[in-house]
Amino acid sequence: MGEGPAYGYEMTKRLRARGLSIVGEGSIYPLLGRLERDGLVETRRAASNGGPPRKYYSLSPDGQRALEAGVTEWQTARDAVDGALGLVKVEVGP
Amino acid sequence: MNDFVEECRREWRRLGVPDPIANEMAADLAADIEEAEAEGGSAEDVLGNSVFDPQRFAASWAGARGVTAPQPLFDEPPKRRGVLAVALAGFGAFFALAAVALLLGRRSASAAISVRTIFPGRAGPYGSVGVAPSLRFPSFGPQFVVQHGGAFVLFAGLMLLLGVVALGLAVMYWSPWSPWSRHRLKVHAREVGRPNRSARSGR
């Protein structure tokens, strides 16, 4: 969503293009619903390319702050996991 | 419209999702599925495994948005539950009290009758000592007690048992910890998924 407003299926396609198809499968709608309920996204209805009007989701100011906090938290966790896994010696093939 | 979307609409109607919101969600879903099909894909590309369980998907989405109507905790309306519980409690209390009164009355009557039999001249204004007018036994009292005492006690005991059971059932029926209530809660949780009691009609 940080790349710009998108409707449900468009977001699914974006995620799939980044190898995150499992996130998009069916769970995207409840996820967007939860973000909307929590005020982390803003919505507007607009015409899509030749199709019916769609509901576009974009980050709200609160959502932007939550995204920044989430990214920081994720990177911290990832670094910690990377550090732990770095100690593991993996033997590769004969 | 797509069968999947129709199934979702039915589920939203059942969950009390306001029509304008249900229409909006249905329209978005239908448009996404149509787009996927136009690109040579299918509804599964949009919904993944959820395509096989529209009710669950619909309930999950509506619950996440917080647009489901508050679900009743119990199947029956609270007023009906209350009437049933009160009726059971009243029935139980009546039988229990009646049984206790009969047992105590019989004991008093027997004692008074014994007194009168031993000391016939000490009968009071009611004809016997210490017996309430409604529980007085006439001169045939001792014979009555002797001949029907076992059946009388059995009858009173059964009434007492019935009363206690009815009172217990009333408490169990009303209590949220009873098996019935827990069963209702399980059904409720299974049907709605994560219960959401903060319906917001504006979304």
Image (tube, rainbow, N blue to C red):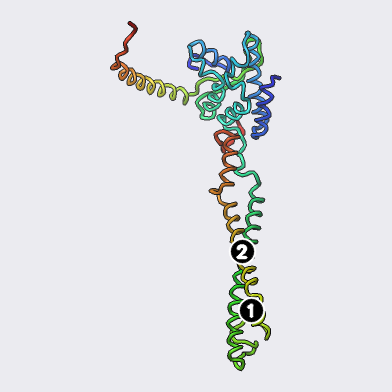
- To the question of a shared chain for discs 1 and 2, the answer is yes
Subunit bearing disc 2: B
- The label on residue A1 is none
What residue appears at the point 62 percent right and 61 percent down from the top-left corner?
Answer: B162
Question: Taking B15 as reference, is A11 above or below it?
Answer: above
Please tell me whether mark 1 sits on a helix, a strand or a loop. helix
| Residue type marked 2 | Ala
Question: Taking B116 as reference, is B55 above or below it?
Answer: above
Subunit bearing disc 1: B
Tag count in the figure?
A: 2
Q: Quadrant of residue A91?
A: top left
In the picture of the structure, the residue carrying the numbered disc 1 is B146
Q: Quadrant of residue B182?
A: top right
Question: Taking A27 as reference, is B181 above or below it?
Answer: below
- Sequence-earlier tag: 1 or 2: 2
CA neighbours of label 1 inside 10 A, class few (<14), some (14 to 19), many (20+): few
Q: Are marks 1 and 2 in contact (CB under 8 Å)?
A: no
What residue appears at the point 65 percent right and 61 percent down from the top-left corner?
Answer: B91
Of residue B159 and residue B151, the one placed in the foreground of this image is B151
Q: Give the distance between the C-alpha atoms of the residues marked 1 and 2, in whole angstroms.
A: 29 Å
Residue B160 x %, y %: 60, 65
Between circles 1 and 2, the one closer to the viewer is 1
Question: Taking B98 as reference, is B28 above or below it?
Answer: above
What residue appears at the point 43 percent right and 24 percent down from the top-left corner?
Answer: A65
What residue appears at the point 60 percent right and 16 percent down from the top-left corner?
Answer: B44
| Residue type marked 1 | Val
In the picture of the structure, the residue carrying the numbered disc 2 is B93
